[in-house]
Amino acid sequence: MPELPEVEVTRRRIEPLLVGRTIASVRTTGPSYFYLTDPALLAREIRGRAVQRLERIGKYLLGALDDGRSLLLHLGMTGQLFSSEASSVRLLSAAHRAALEPGAQRGFVPDEHTHLVLGFRDGGPRVQFRDVRKFGKVALLAAGEQHPRLARLGADALGAQGGDLFERSRGRVVAVKQLLLDQAFLAGVGNIYADEALHLAGVRPTRRAGRVTREEWDRIAQGVRQVLLRSIEAGGSSIDDFVAPDGSDGAYQLERRVYARTGEPCPSCSAVVRRVVLAQRSAHYCPRCQH
Ligand SMILES: [Zn+2]
């Protein structure tokens, strides 16, 4: 599932493909829960518009149009936003992949999962939004409209501050890991990064959030920023379906310390990494380094 670093990597790489270009054609699939704005209306309204800026808010991308409206994009669980010039075997169906020679790369032809294809007046590369599971979202927002999904978000995780997290966690009985995953508490931290940040901070994922000390929250905030920035630098994680807009894979998953490393040695102390289930999701930690 794309988390903050993958969305930020997408923003940085898709920005030059969108900003300053005038949309000449819009292709969509039929109405579905993928579209928060009716696809026919969306296509009609954004044709002829140019994108002025592309911002990220938590895991949402917001493209500011030249008429004051905004295009809201969310990658959901399996969303892929990429250039028509990208080539990656990860974009192909399993059957298609199996038919390829080892190491072969091939351009992507939009399929039934490609819900948005933007063509531009300059005739250059198209921007395509593909989402196999359709938990992604597209919406057209009126000028000044604050979408309820954005209004609910907490502070952006890249700006996490220990003092703020400490104060807002007082009295909270949920596990600290679960609170970190709550997008209203901190926007953009997902499963991998929460486990990694807690390991760097030396705090067990199962600790009651309201009992985590100020000093520990400082270390957690620092850990969150560190793992997110490092992942952005590495191009994100490609454990699931994430593909950068140019078709490349992220490499952060190769550096992870405890996430999905159950039974392997902790990189700091060599104790065996453990897994515990918290609110139906796996948490990974070192029993010696994390208290
Ligand atoms: Zn350890």
Image: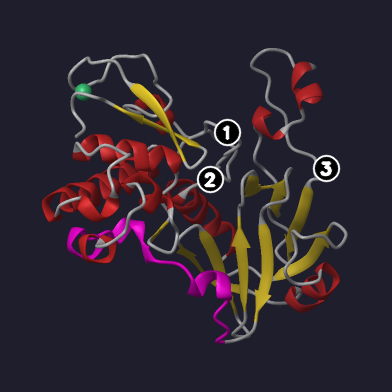
Asked if residue 18 is positioned above or below residue 249 in the image, the reply reads below
Helix, strand or loop status at disc 3: loop
Image quadrant in which the C terminus is located? top left
In the image, taking residue 221 as reference, residue 109 lies left or right, namely right
Front residue (pair 72, 183):
183
The CA span between labels 3 and 2 is 21 Å
Going 32% across and 39% down the picture, which residue do you hit?
A: 206
Boundaries of the magenta span: 144-165
Residue 34 colored magenta? no
Going 36% across and 51% down the picture, which residue do you hit?
A: 174
Q: Amino acid at mark 2?
A: Pro
Which dot marks residue 111? 3
Query: Where is residue 222 drawn, in percent x and y?
Result: 21, 49
Query: Where is residue 53 drawn, in percent x and y?
Result: 51, 71
Query: Where is residue 87 drawn, in percent x and y?
Result: 66, 34
Residue that numbered label 2 is attached to: 2
